Image: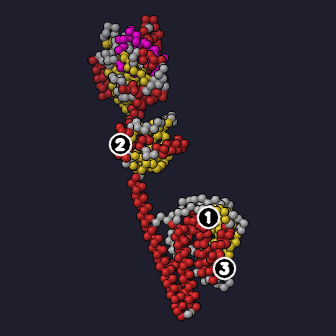
Amino acid sequence: MAHVTETTDLHVPAPADQVQPIRRGAQSRLPLKTAIIGGGKSCADLLALLSDERLTHLKMEILGVADPNPAAPGISRAKELGLFTTGDFSELYNLPGLNLVMELTGSLAVREQVIRTIPLQVTFIDHRGARLLWDLIQMEIEKQSLQVESEKKLRQFLESAHDVIIIKDLEGRYLYVNPAGSLSTGLSREQVIGHTDFELFPEAQARAMSESHQEVVRERKTRFSKDRMHIGGEVRQYDTVRFPIFNEQGDMDSLAIISRDVTEEMALQEELRRNKEYLENILSNSYDMIITTDTAGRIVTVNPAAERMLGYSRDEMIGVRVENFWQETERRREIIRQVETLGAVTNAPATLVAKEGRLVEISLSISLLRDAQGRVLGTVGISKDVTEENRLRKQLLEQERLAAVGQTVASVTHCMKNVLNGLKGGSYMVEVGLKRNDPKLTREGWETVQEGVDRISKISLNMLSYCRDRKPVPVAVSPYQLARDTVELVEKSARQQGVTLTCRGAEDEIVHLDPDAVGRALLNLVTNAVEACKEKTYGPGESPRVDVRVERAEGGIRFTVRDNGVGMDQEVREQLFKRFFSTKSYQGTGLGLSTTAKIVAEHGGTIAVDSESGKGSTFTVFIPSEPQRTEGETCRP
């Protein structure tokens, strides 16, 4: 932005071939209401100079001083003078009538921050321009003894200034232009001095510049403006101040112009404005709740979605601790501890308390909020209202549960019906055999009844194992003896059907497992293997066989059940452990292998199958030495 310096007793640095004095003038009638950024020694000295009664005619009013150090000498001096002081320079922008800000810190970072934030109607002088003002004031005080030296310094400052500095006579002829002015116009000093705007620029541009010139001459007042100039095929924007220069008699004899090229700064401010609008649109139109907090957990910003979700207005939430809206404050603290460790947490479930006690279930993603230097400012959290989603999920699970109940009842009922028909047939044969005194018929009927009872027992045990969400109760057992006992339960009926059953393995091993549950799983596998052998027609030299093996494995024990029965194709293998899947038609419930898989999962183990159609199957079960509970399928019905 343009530097505004309303000075007196100036002499104009002239071209090398001719020295032109900067004529003494009087102050403009428009006072400069100024704020200073940087409360160092330079600020304290400047305040001391401006408080000198000899300089009251400068009509420069200092409104306030900003410095993060409350003990800075400039802050202390400003407080003595009753001026406004602050640690945040942006608060200076709110001072009534402020039209000029001077930066005395010398920091490029502070200068960039001011450029990004300063209101467009306020003129800005950085530490270089302020230095110029400082020396001009010193020249006023020391004009009698240091006039020659001051003029040298003034020439140096004018020549080295980054702003365009121009002096014209009342007719509009250029008396002085500094190197920055020559560079901005693309014309040398020799090409400019002594000429008017109409001799140097296109007519439309020259007319606009002349009108501004005449306005200052006519009204004899300082004028601020924002100018646009076509230079080098592009439009450049300038913040400009024009002010009259008066001679010792009080007559205006020349005009000074100071302009700063703010094209890049305006583009930056426009980009910042667009980005701000973009972000505000995101916040305003987001369906999810977005809340930021400071390091103390107090709410700093909320978006409209937060107001809708919680039922509170923005004013009711700003400054309130965010924990006040949580059903469980310890849950919030737990999440924050994770954020401090990991930097962010995503999709954390939580429950908030909305207005009138209504509970809102959310999925929260939260991360630390940092500034450009990486310092933590607080947190930013994005919350999705999942109350309805959770309700629908629970409803769906309930529907699935009811459907599973129906499917289970239908499957078991169908199987039980077939078993009951067998029991009826067997009991009828027993009754007829007894009436006829026919032992053979009676024995055949009784065997049918026993077979039906065994099937009902098996169905009942599988249903109990499958439906019960049971944590294994491990005890020290011999896995070989457990497998041996299981084989003995099936061995008699297998022998009657011509199937050879063997059990081999590590007889001395002792592991911890639930013998009832694992025995149930092994019984299902061995029974299935025997039945697979029954369904196959064997050729010459081949006989049905089921081998059970127990081996020590790393971290646990391995049971292997191998048969040379009918085997399975890939399609059957892929569905083998699914609930209610069976290849036994009306004779099976489809719960046997599902129950086996559930028992193995409850022990933290694994089950695998290797099978080929027509050649047999091998089931391998691994149980870890220390069973651990895992989330298995439970009987939700």
Residue 609 horizontal side relative to residue 236, left or right: right
Of 500 and 329, the residue lying toward us: 329
Of 391 and 240, the residue lying toward us: 391
Foreground mark, 1 or 2, reads 1
Foreground mark, 3 or 1, reads 1
Percent x, y of residue 485: 65, 72
Percent x, y of residue 322: 43, 40
Percent x, y of residue 74: 46, 18
Q: Residue at x 68, y 69 (%)?
A: 480
Q: Which mark is residue 514?
A: 1
Of 372 and 159, the residue lying toward us: 372
Q: What is the C-alpha distance between the residues marked 1 and 2?
A: 55 Å
Outermost residue on the left side: it is 218
Q: Which portion, as a residue range, is magenta? A: 32-59
Q: Which residue is mark 3?
A: 500
Image position of 355 with respect to 518: above or below:
above
For numbered disc 2, what is the local secondary structure? Answer: loop
The mark nearer the N terminus, 3 or 1, is 3
Amino acid marked by disc 2 = Tyr
Q: Residue at x 59, y 75 (%)?
A: 528
Amino acid marked by disc 3 = Thr
Q: Which mark is residue 312?
A: 2
Amino acid marked by disc 1 = Asp
The mark nearer the N terminus, 2 or 3, is 2
Of 636 and 159, the residue lying toward us: 636
